Image: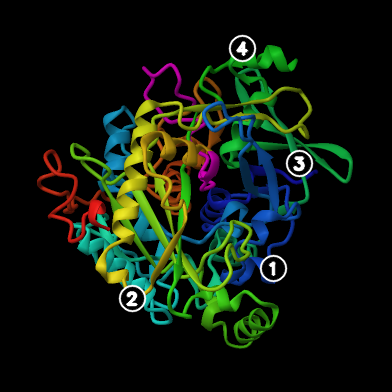
Amino acid sequence: MNKQFDYIIVGAGSAGCVLANRLTESGENEVLLLETGGNDKNILIQMPTALSYPMNTEKFCWQFYSEPEPYLDNRKMHCPRGKVMGGSSSINGMVYVRGHARDYDQWEEDGVAGWSFKDCLPYFKRSESWQGGEDDYRGGSGPMATCGGNNMRLNPLYQAFIEAGHEAGYPKTDDYNGEQQEGFGAMHMTVDQGVRASASNAYINEAKKRSNLTIIQSVLVQKVLLKGKTAVGVEYKINNQIKTVNASKEVILSAGSVGSPQLLQLSGIGPVDVLKSAGVELHHELPGVGENLQDHLEVYFQYHCKKPITLNSKLNYFSMTLIGARWLLFKSGLGATNHFESCGFIRSRKGLEWPNIQYHFLPAAMRYDGKSSMDGHGYQVHAGVNKPASRGSIKINSPDPEAKPTILFNYLQSEQDRKDWRDCIRLTREILNQPALDDFRGDEANPGPEVNTDDEIDAWVRANVESAYHASCTCKMGSDKDPMAVVNNKGQVNGIDRLRVVDSSIFPTITNGNLNGPTIMAAEKIADVILGIQPLSSVNINVWIDPDWQNSQRQREVKRPLTSS
């Protein structure tokens, strides 16, 4: 390629799309965006209710699997990553969760200067257009539309779940992305007038009209080209031909939590033993590349429903055709939502300052592939422990860029994680057995009443837990005193000039919630750094923390204790 570029961005996912937009806004920079996947203009991507389909295809998704997980009965866990314009934001569940304010304060406390919540909030606001308009916490005019789907209007189970959480002794929250995350309330999603608000739709649709943005799809980047300790370009494969392209200012890796550490290692940047074992020449030792892997796990509790009001009646061909037709014509109805319209965030034990358990409620009993999991009507809540102590790794095992890396999460390696999961199962069952759900609740189908003791819970979790698809933290930000830090607080790769990583791999620790929102925020923030723009002014604002968190797990006594259910 003869054209000269200032910046090369590898990966058109949640971060790469943001960067491509912001770096071309002024018209001063020539930017090349490279993406392995193809076009995202497909009904299965754009229609929110079809969310289970894209992540289960080879066309739109890297179908990674972990190694046998030693603490999960040696199960190989599915790890899909987006391979399409928009990356994982084009195949995800569209749930919008910023995380808790203390997640970001913790980053700064651990040595990542400038990443406290007061510094991040302005960038969350800049990225967002919230259905309720701008306030102190929410953005009203950003590229990324967020809303409540059908705002719980189409099914009484949504509100019943919120009331059940309240009866169990937990607070309600008007906006978990605002002042108070902890509690039960409406859930938000990245949907824009009934259409998936992917990073591609939000940031690239406008940016691709600019003459200074070049997008090349269906390419596989092989490695970063280095001249000494300076990144000068990338090597990529297209139509079975190997080509190179140079960047006069920077190469930016936004290939995701699997792709970015993989590319660094393929380029000879990473742990000595990993590169030697894979047969890759060492150019720069960085022991943290591919380490610190974190993810969220989840299970679903399923109950039969005594009333014929759930989405299980809509999973037949005829109903889905009608839903699809309404969506095509009007972008409304059941096709215009991900169906996760109520949720909860709680603490599993006293002494935790902020929540570590997340709930997504769904008025249907379904499998991960979107098919019904029972005869008749049912509902479920996805429950997960969000602040794991266990850590895994991603390692290349060959110099071949087309070879999939070795992924090992080490899920539930930590005894604290196993204890938190026992608490999670018991607390969830207690919530779902509150009076607010009496009119709807039939038999517990999953886990089932036979799962009670610690050993029974441990065995059931090992056999049934699934990834929430939030792999992250494999190129962590850290201070210059942290030997495992891969990048500094500006996303710059330690020891390599003109090379940056910007995606969820740079998170030091995983946030308390879904990762799309935080990834977009991080890209917005670092875009200003790259452009030399004065950062948005930090905002000191109130964040609700239970005043009795040190002594109590919840605010008040549960209405119906688990023992009497």
Point out the stretch of residues depicted in magenta: 463-486
Tell me which numbered mark, 4 or 1, is placed earlier along the sequence: 1
Above or below: residue 145 compared with residue 528: below
Residue drawn at point x = 76 percent, y = 41 percent: 220
Distance from disc 2 to disc 3, alpha carbons, whole Å, reads 54 Å
Contact between labelled residues 4 and 3, with CB atoms less than 8 Å apart = no
Is 427 on the left-hand or right-hand side of 152? left
What is the chief secondary structure element of the magenta stretch? loop
Contact between labelled residues 3 and 2, with CB atoms less than 8 Å apart = no
Badge 3 is on which residue? 220
> Which dot, 2 or 4, sits closer to the camera?
2
Residue 478 seen in this snapshot? yes
Distance from disc 4 to disc 1, alpha carbons, whole Å, reads 42 Å
Badge 2 is on which residue? 439
Tell me which numbered mark, 2 or 3, is placed earlier along the sequence: 3
Distance from disc 3 to disc 4, alpha carbons, whole Å, reads 25 Å
Above or below: residue 143 compared with residue 119: below
Tell me which numbered mark, 3 or 4, is placed earlier along the sequence: 3
Q: Is residue 253 magenta?
A: no
Q: Secondary structure at mark 2?
A: loop
Contact between labelled residues 4 and 2, with CB atoms less than 8 Å apart = no
In percent of width and height, residue 79 lies at 61, 42
Tell me which numbered mark, 1 or 2, is placed earlier along the sequence: 1
Where's the N terminus, which quadrant? top right
Badge 4 is on which residue? 272
Snapshot quadrant of residue 327: bottom right
Tell me which numbered mark, 2 or 4, is placed earlier along the sequence: 4
Snapshot quadrant of residue 286: top right
Q: Secondary structure at mark 1?
A: loop
Task: Rate crowding at label 4 as few (under 14), some (14 to 19) or many (20 or more) other CA atoms within 10 Å.
Answer: some
Q: Nearer the viewer, residue 203 or 470?
A: 470
